[in-house]
Image: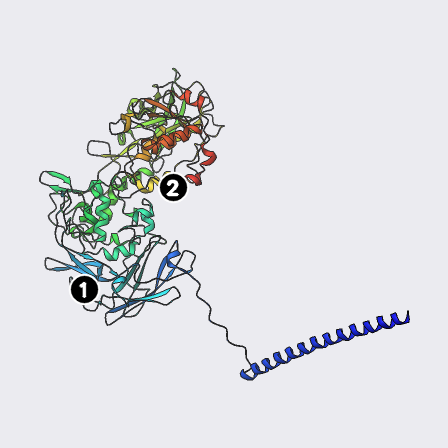
Amino acid sequence: MNNKFVMQNASRNARAKTMERKIMDIKTKQLKLSLIALTASALLFGCSDGNDGADGADGVVGVNIDSVSSVQAQFTQATVTDGVVMVNFELENANGVAVLGLTKDYDLRFGIAQLAKVTETVGDAEVDRGYQWQAYINELKEPGTPPNDTSDLTPSPQYQANVEAASNCEECLVDNGDGSYSYTFQQNIADVTEPLTITYGEDNTHRATLELKLPQATANAHHDWQPSSGATTDIQTRNVVSIAACYTCHQPESLALHGGRRIALENCASCHTSTSGDPESGNSVDYTYMIHAIHKGQDRETSTPDGMVPAPYKIVGYGGSVHDYGKVMYPQKPAADCSSCHVEGDGAPANADLFKADLSNTACVSCHTEKPSQSHSSTNCVACHNSTDTYPGTGSAEKRHGDVLKAYVEAEAMGVTFSNIGLDAMGDLQFDVQVTDADGAAVDAGFIKQSTRVIVAWDTDKDFPSYSDASYSNRRFKLEDGTYDATSKTFTIVADTFDMPTDATGKTFELWSTIEVCFNNGGYAVDEIAMTACSDSTRSVAVKEAPYRFVWSGSGMNDTMQAAMRRSIIDAAKCQSCHNQENYHYNNGYNCQTCHTSDKTTKTDDSYPGGKKPTSYAFKAHEADGHYLKYAGVQSGTVLKTDCSTCHTPDGIQLGRASDRVWRYGDKETGADIWVSSDAGTCLSCHQKYLSDSGANHITANGGILDGMSADDVNTRAAEACSTCHSPMQLMEIHGN
């Protein structure tokens, strides 16, 4: 036992000593490491001044130009030194992040112009023509190969303002590496004599322009400044129209011109100068001239000894393509309201009222041509048509245009009043109607065009009377067919050409006035526009009055019930903003659907598939010339039909809201009547001509009816589920909004 104990004790002692040696080894290593670290630290302290090292420069936060989905340019400075123009600018995406990597090899172009005081010699006098842009970069261009149709073209050499491409200069563009850049113009502006002499004025306002066209995005920018002082404010300007006014009728993409690289009015105005023309047509492309001539459109005429003849404004574009603006239907009727484009007031451009200045003949001639009548012997229009030294019987452009529109302004302040609504002895609807002036006084019949009508409708909260119950031609009544009380100046109308619906009680009825009053025509030697007794020499203007709606009690009006409102579909104010005072007929607003119901009869038209064209309001609006120019017409880009919001309210394209509505269409092969379910008919108002078999199958597979034999047949079979997938947002997206 003792020997065993001794041996175990010795073994434990040996293990303990071994453990102690390991611990000593670890401590020795730790000490060595500590000494090394201390030594290194001392060496570092020995080489330092006792402060931490400075932070490195921050890296540039930016996105490469090839990966951006949007790009915006902004000038930050411009200078002129001995005729050499240098500009600084920045690029950012829509989120304000710097865009990096722009080089001269991108489609990058710059323009430079000055705003100079211009005079014209007329006889022995120098006449002030205001301030006009003069481009420093110009080119004399000879006519190219003429197009096949040379009518109304007069080819001749023309000067054209131009821009310079950055790619033509190795050193002009400098990338600062942080989204900022500088560019030195190749064109020296100090002494420009070819092909046009442009005399540099350091006190004149100058404009530098930039246009950058990427495959996926476009940027335009401009910078106005006075070289002599460097000032960018309190300098002469010529900013007349805001592009926001253009967007009232135009879609933004329709104004992306010259291959889509030019999208800013300021760039357009300083390049389309008064010396610029189109060599293939011989027509001016001066900005003022071009814009007015385009918008005069199909109404542009010139006087000849044999009468007025069309004078279409044409431009020959890239590849010899002819842009015939004589087909444009500018909807500003009866005359262009200058304020439609020249919008004044808060937020307006600095020179929005320039159209009142009577300085230039350019706008006059561009619309009315150099010969508006045989009595005009001069193109110096403002010599007579001005507001300060008016030739007897004439007036300024503002007054003459205003004279045309003044009657409409006065008629808008008038009213139409309905009363004594009930049934006559025969059970026919009867009512009284008065026209009142701005003060509420009744207007005598002599001032009222008595062939104008009142239209009766019901079910206005739905889709108006079905055509089989009462056609629109049986629901409209001329004043002259009623009786007139001269003492009260009241017409009494008996609506005896339709039968009141058997379930009329509780329905919402509508009386819609298309009544017109007469005014003098104005013009030469007429001082004032005024309501005038109707005759062959007067014109008639619609009194603007909202439809009068009421609930039928069984024998008359039910004053205790609120008239039901139709679902929101279009915004009439948007129509008015483009069309001004007149649209097509019945110019009291835009209540077209009261006659042009969804089931209205088709119209013979050999140009339409099957020879029968629908006449519903939706079809006529969607197919109207000017509304449909994305896929048809002159490609002038007025209103793109796919931009639903141009006319519709935000919820105006909601499907599934009128499941009992039925549409009448013509078969595309035979023209025979076919009846179509509610949502499907809405789609066909645009798509019938182009509807494929797969599209038709999609509609019918989701409960739509395209082959109804009657309205009852459609309502029996239809089970549309379109709204399940096609929300307003989804519809907007698939239509390119």
Classed neighbour count for the residue bearing mark 2: other residues with Cα under 10 Å, few (<14), some (14–19), many (≥20): some
Q: In this view, does 664 lie above or below 191?
A: above
Q: How far apart are marks 1 and 2 (CA)?
A: 46 Å
Q: Can residue 6 be seen in this view?
A: yes
- Amino acid under disc 1: Ile
Q: Is residue 6 above or below residue 446?
A: below
Q: Nearer the viewer, residue 391 or 154?
A: 154
**The image quarter in which residue 680 lies:** top left
Q: Please name the residue that numbered disc 1 is placed on.
A: 198
- Amino acid under disc 2: Ser
Quadrant into which the C terminus falls? top left
Q: Which mark is residue 645?
A: 2
Q: Residue 28 carries which label?
A: none
Please, which residue is most extreme toward the front here?
Answer: 3
Please, which residue is most extreme toward the left here?
Answer: 305
Q: Can residue 462 be seen in this view?
A: no
Please, which residue is most extreme toward the top here?
Answer: 426
**The image quarter in which residue 571 lies:** top left
The residue shown at (49%, 28%) is: 561
Q: In this view, does 528 lie to the left or right of 646?
A: left
The residue shown at (31%, 42%) is: 639
* Residue 360 coordinates in the image, percent (x, y): 20, 54
* Residue 190 coordinates in the image, percent (x, y): 21, 69
Q: What element carries label 1?
A: loop
Circles 1 and 2: CB atoms closer than 8 Å: no
Quadrant into which the N terminus falls? bottom right
